[in-house]
């Protein structure tokens, strides 16, 4: 199958697409990708909040399961070099050991499903405020797991400033909807933050 004309055409399409993207300056590539991330995450959050606010919807945890399923399927498609997302090569070789994937998948599942589940007990602005603090536990785990040297005071201060800015920005919604601090909901979103902090480490 890999040597069939259809497969070669698919790989050629992937190579052509990759070459066209690489033709742009690195700055343009970075800006385009960054804007795409913000755009699609924005759509994700709008849809998530709309579903959670639907009367009678109490299946927040299933949103996390569906997100992980979507990530799994799309990752499999990307690695298989299908025609519409071909990378111009055959299937890529696995870099990380297979034993690393179950833990990462579990952390991703916990991060997504617990955060979505918490929306049954707290409102969306409260969740965003807590999730905005993810950088700090990520740095803490990086030191504990030995993935980084100790951070300098300037780096810690910068991280706290970023988190404070995100919290201030997210807190703007509190003027429209009062924050909800249900203990179980706060526990869920806190656990999701720490599960998410494991992923980059």
Image (cartoon, helix red, strand yellow):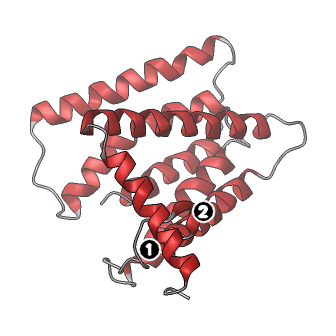
Q: Residue furthest top?
A: 175
- On screen, residue 30 versus residue 6, left or right, reads left
- How far, Cα to Cα, is label 2 from label 1? 13 Å
Residue 50 vertical position relative to residue 23 in the rendered view, above or below: above
Q: Quadrant of the C terminus?
A: bottom left
The quarter holding residue 166 reads: top left
**Residue 146 percent location from the top left of the image:** 17, 64
Residue occupying the point 79% across, 34% down: 53
Q: Which mark is residue 68?
A: 2
Residue occupying the point 39% across, 43% down: 134
**Residue 38 percent location from the top left of the image:** 49, 34
Residue 114 vertical position relative to residue 75 in the rendered view, above or below: above
Q: Residue furthest front?
A: 5
Label 2 or label 1, whichever comes before in sequence order: 2
Q: Residues within 10 Å of mark 2 (few under 14, many from 20)?
A: many
**Residue 152 percent location from the top left of the image:** 9, 39
Residue receiving disc 1: 103
Label 2's element? Answer: helix
Residue 85 vertical position relative to residue 52 in the rendered view, above or below: below
Label 1's element? Answer: helix
**Residue 82 percent location from the top left of the image:** 56, 70
- On screen, residue 57 versus residue 184, left or right, reads right
The quarter holding residue 144 reads: bottom left
> Mark 2 against mark 1, which lies toward the viewer?
2
């Amino acid at each position: 199958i890999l040597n069939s004309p259809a497969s070669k055409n698919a790989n050629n399409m992937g190579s052509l697409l990759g070459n066209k993207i690489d033709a742009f300056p690195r700055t343009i590539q970075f800006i385009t990708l960054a804007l795409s991330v913000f755009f699609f995450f924005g759509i994700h959050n709008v849809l998530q909040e709309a579903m959670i606010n639907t009367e009678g919807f109490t299946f927040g945890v299933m949103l996390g399961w569906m997100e992980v399923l979507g990530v799994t399927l799309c990752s499999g498609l990307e690695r298989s070099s299908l025609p519409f997302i071909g990378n111009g090569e055959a299937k890529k070789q696995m870099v990380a050991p297979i034993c690393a994937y179950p833990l990462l998948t579990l952390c991703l599942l916990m991060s997504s499903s617990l955060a979505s589940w918490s929306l049954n007990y707290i409102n969306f602005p409260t969740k965003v405020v807590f999730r905005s603090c993810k950088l700090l536990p990520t740095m803490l785990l990086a030191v504990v797991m030995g993935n980084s040297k100790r951070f300098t005071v300037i780096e810690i201060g910068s991280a706290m400033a970023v988190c404070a800015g995100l919290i201030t920005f997210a807190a703007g919604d509190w003027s429209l909807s009062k924050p909800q601090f249900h203990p179980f909901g706060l526990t869920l979103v806190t656990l999701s933050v720490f599960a998410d902090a494991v992923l980059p480490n």
